[in-house]
Amino acid sequence: MTVGSLNKREKALRFSSGTVALAVSGLLVKFLGMVYKIPLTNLLGDEGMGYFNAAYTVYTLFFVLATSGLPVALSLLVSESVAKGDERGAGKLYRSAARLFLIVGFFGMLLMALPARHFSRLLGSSEAAAGILAVSPTLLFMTYAGALRGYFQGRRRMVPIALSQILEAGGKFIFGLLFASLALSYYNRSVVAAYAIFGLTLASFFATLSLYLCKRHFDSDEGHLAACCGAISSFERKENLRKIAKLAFPIRSALR
């Protein structure tokens, strides 16, 4: 058996095991999500859950607007570069996307946090502003995590993605319930709900950190550090962003 066929077989096995890990993590995330709501509702009550859900609704809206299509576009482009053997190109695609995602996440966080009181009034839950502020940094973490997940997906490395999903769901479960329990004796329901949803913020930070550390380890282990750390010109960055935008927003690109 040739070296090339061995490498292909190894990559196929790695992808299969990663796909299984991703499927298992998906089931675990759904299970934790269902279990999480029962003790959380008991802690917050109907009033507190109203504040919690209002803040989460605003976050979900901004998250969809900030990340729609971008991670998938990055994964497709990285996959194409890797298939061509262009490791440097894959690294530059990630770096271009990471900068874009961080900028989008940062401004999205500001647009969500600064008018928090207005959003809470629009939702008919004026005291939900504290929860919106508490969850707003999650947008920054998860948009950057989208770049990392797109990079790993493009390389058919699913285990880091599965790990980050478990950390996010498990952290939300543990930190959310812990913070809500500690705050219950000292604050009103709106603040307790904010403490509970801050558990998601902290969990998203650790999920993003795990992806970043996995990427550093992967690049070092696979010998891709040189490809990832090389200089990238402004022209290359603009071209990469154009490619990402063309795939992420095909209708808008077609109209130009």
Image (spheres, rainbow, N blue to C red):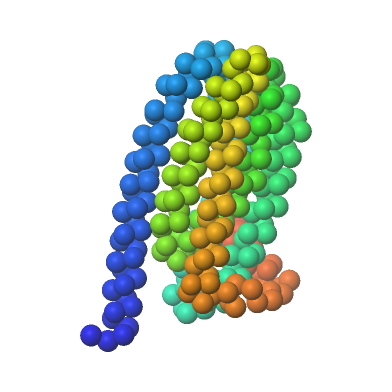
The one nearer the camera, 78 or 192, is: 192
Q: Quadrant of residue 160?
A: bottom left
Mark yes or no: residue 60 visible.
no
- What residue lies at 71% left-to-right and 47% top-to-bottom? 106
Q: Please state, as top left, top right, bottom left or bottom right, where the C terminus lies in the image.
A: bottom right
- What residue lies at 67% left-to-right and 59% top-to-bottom? 99
**Residue 250's x, y, as percent?**
55, 56
Compared with 219, 203 (above or below) is above
- What residue lies at 33% left-to-right and 48% top-to-bottom? 23
**Residue 90's x, y, as percent?**
54, 71
Compared with 65, 160 (above or below) is below
Q: Which residue is farthest bottom? A: 2
**Residue 220's x, y, as percent?**
53, 72
- What is the number of callouts on the image? 0
Mark yes or no: residue 80 visible.
yes
- What residue lies at 45% left-to-right and 53% top-to-bottom? 161
Q: Quadrant of residue 176?
A: top right
**Residue 215's x, y, as percent?**
53, 63
Q: Which residue is farthest left? A: 1
